[in-house]
Each structure stands twice: as structure tokens, then as C-alpha cells.
Image: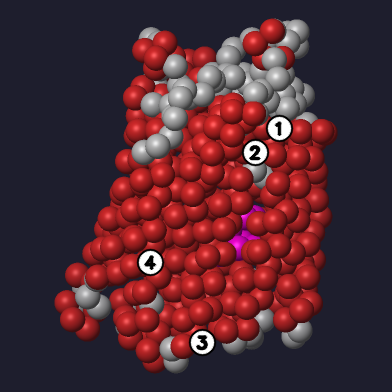
Amino acid sequence: MTAIASTTGTASPDAPATDASSTPYTFEEKRKRIFAIFAASSGNLVEWFDFYVYAFCAIYFAPAFFPKSDPTAQLLNTAGVFAAGFLMRPIGGWIFGRLADRKGRKTSMVVSVTMMCVGSLVIACLPTYASIGAAAPVLLLAARLLQGLSVGGEYGTTATYMSEVAMRGQRGFFSSFQYVTLIGGQLLAVVVVVVLQQFLDDAELKSWGWRIPFVLGAVAAVVALMLRRSLTETASTQTRAAKGAGTMGELFRHHKRAFFMVLGYTAGGSLIFYTFTTYMQKYLVNSAGMSIKTASNVMTACLFIYMCMQPLFGALSDRIGRRSNMLLFGALGALITVPVLTSLQNVTSPLLAGILIVVALAVVSFYTSISGIVKAEMFPPEVRALGVGLSYAVGNAIFGGSAEYVALGLKSIGHESYFYWYVTAMMVVVFAVSLMLPRRATYLHHDK
């Protein structure tokens, strides 16, 4: 595969188009860029499948590692390990962001998917508490930390690569495929669990069936690794060799404001995203009283619709601008969170529950469809992967990773509704930060 010229730069957002940036793409250039999006996305799908399988299988393996009689206590323990994986994300964002800015996006993506493969394989083979006692949850935590490190590096590097390889004027549309595959990873995890539920009873799933998805994830990661090895690098040799490339000093010396803006809207975006995706299955079971199978079926349908929304909202941002997308996200998110979660708590119809969740996910799509590109447009190429990855990882670790734990914790003390208002408050923060976003791309040429 021949080189794909990067369209990134540091020109003023109001500068007139240059000849290079206004020349139409040839058919061959379009083909190469679309293939690159596919190859990068496939690895992204596998990484997130491996990461989310934990959340969707937790109901089954929680007793094997945390043998307590109270189901909520077991879920709290597994949610704590889930959150611990998120705490590794800032470290992963820093390590892999630096690697991507100094050694190349391709190298970083290959290493991250390899680490995810190892983490999934370890979890699949772990002995239970009954076999090795307290060492079992400790080893589970260690494997989860490795996965968190991997995913911490995955997001920033993939977002950077896809924003750089996407065709100008359609960057919102093509970059949205990062979340198509991220959600697709969740969806695939749910589908695998639903299929297993059809062939195995609860006792078999709790005994050994929960291991199957982790094995599948490890195998799929090998395929993704092969695809990523075929990718063409988008970061130029000059950019990678630049003084301060991939360093914290350069990032905070010249791009501190961009870093904290991304951190601000990532905090709210991650919190509401995990509330209506990974936590929602447990919410439907624990709070709405649905069976595990019914909740899984509802979430499968909702995630599929949500996944299909991403390119539509990404294309919308190409027309109305990223800033408008983000303002709509913050405003609508603040308005609908409490009504939707309150209604879901008392819903009895799976169909009505699905409709309410889809409405919420449509609002979240204003953010997730452009999550990568809106961040990438705020940093120059020499610190782009580090800036995107680290700011996202910090906000995601603190607010996204703790979503389940905070929700379950408040429920355990009888104040579940406090969580709804917490999410709403963070949406107000997103709206306030979005008001400060530039109206046009700062570092990716001639795109809104």
C-alpha cells in the first residue's frame, strides 16, 4: 500500500484553500483512504469488544471471583475492577500518545491491540476464587489493568489516525466510524452473550460459559493485528522528529487550553455514554426488574440502532459544524437525562424501554459521532495523539469509568435518583465548554 499523504497542518482556520488541499481525490486515493479507515476501525472494534465483554459478562462471573450473597455487592466489586481498568487509561493515553507522535500512529495501534489480546486471554484462563482464593480477584484486576492500558492508548491513536486519513469535507462522516466500531464492539459483546444464553443455562454460564467471549476476543485480536500491520503511516518523518513531539512539556506549554477543553466535554460525554450503554443492562435488571435475557435483548436492539446513527450525525457535523453538534449534545443531554432515567425505573414494557434508551442515545450521538475528530482538530500533528489520548483518558477514567460504581453505590444507600442529577450537571458543564469551541477547525485544514 503506497503512502497516504496527510492533510494535516497548522494553517489558520480562515486561510484560503491551497492547491494541494482543493485538488479532488483520485479514485485510487479514495480507495486507499477508505481501506485505511476500515483497517483501523476493525482493530478498534476488536479492542472494544474485548473491553466490553467484561461488563456484559459480569453478571455471570461475579460470584466466581467475589463470593458474597448480595448480588448488588457482587456487582459493586466487579464494577470496581471495571473502574480500575479505566484508571489505567491516562497512563495508556500518555504512553501510546507519545509512541504515536514520535514513532508513528501505525506502531502505536499495533502494540495496543497486541496488549488487549493478552489481557483477554489471561481473563479467559483465570482460575476462580474457589480454586486459588484471594489470588483470583487480584489476577482479574491485573488483567483488567493491562486492558485499560491498551484501551487508553487505543482511542487517541485511532482518533488521530482516522482524522488524518479521512477525506476533507467528509471528516465528520468518516471519523464517525471510530464510534461505529466502538459501539459495534459493545454490540458484538451483547450478541455473543445473547447467543450463549440460547444454548447454555444460567448455571453453565456462571460455571464456564462466560469464558467463551474472552477467548473469541483474543482470537479476533490476532486478525486485527494482521490488518493493522498493513496500514500506511500518516505522521510525516518531519513531524515525528520535531522538537517536543509527543512530550508533555510541548502539550502543556502551548496547548493547555485545548487540553482542558477536551477534558471538560469528555467528562460529561463519557459519563452519559456509559450510563446509557454498559450500565443500562444492569439498570434494567436491578432497577426496572427485567430478566437478564430481556435486558440483553433490549440493549442489543438499542446498540444496533445507536451504531447506525453515527455516520448520520457525523455527516451532520460536516454541514452544521462540530461546535453546533456539541452545543446540541450538552443542551439536550441536560434536558432529557432525569426524565428518561426516571421513566426507565418504572417501565414494564421492553418496547417502551427500548424507545426511551434510543431517544437518549440519539442525543449522545451528537457527541460520539464526532468525538475523535472534534478533539483531533484542536491539536497540531506533533502532539495530536498525546493531546487527544491523554485528555480523553483522564476524563474517561474519572467520569466514565466510575459511572457504574457511582450509580450502584447511590442505589445501595437508597438515593439512586442522585445519579440522574449528577449526569445532568455534567451535561451543563459540556454545554458551557462547547460555547468556547472554535467555529472552524484549528489544525485540520478547511473543515468545519
Q: Is residue 176 left or right of residue 210?
A: right
Q: Does residue 188 appear anywhere in the picture?
A: yes
* Circle 4: element type: helix
User: Are there few (<14), some (14-19), or many (20+) residues within 10 Å of tag 3?
Assistant: few
Residue extending furthest front? 27
The residue where tag 3 is placed is 198
User: Are there few (<14), some (14-19), or many (20+) residues within 10 Å of tag 1?
Assistant: some
The residue where tag 1 is placed is 170
Determine whether label 2 and label 1 are within 8 Å by CB.
Answer: yes
Residues under labels 1 and 4: Cα distance? Answer: 34 Å
**Residue 214 versus residue 416: which sits nearer the camera?**
214
- The magenta region covers 271-278
* Circle 1: element type: loop
Residue extending furthest left? 132
Q: Measured along the vertical axis of the image, is residue 268 above or below residue 411?
A: above
Q: Measured along the vertical axis of the image, is residue 422 above or below residue 268?
A: below
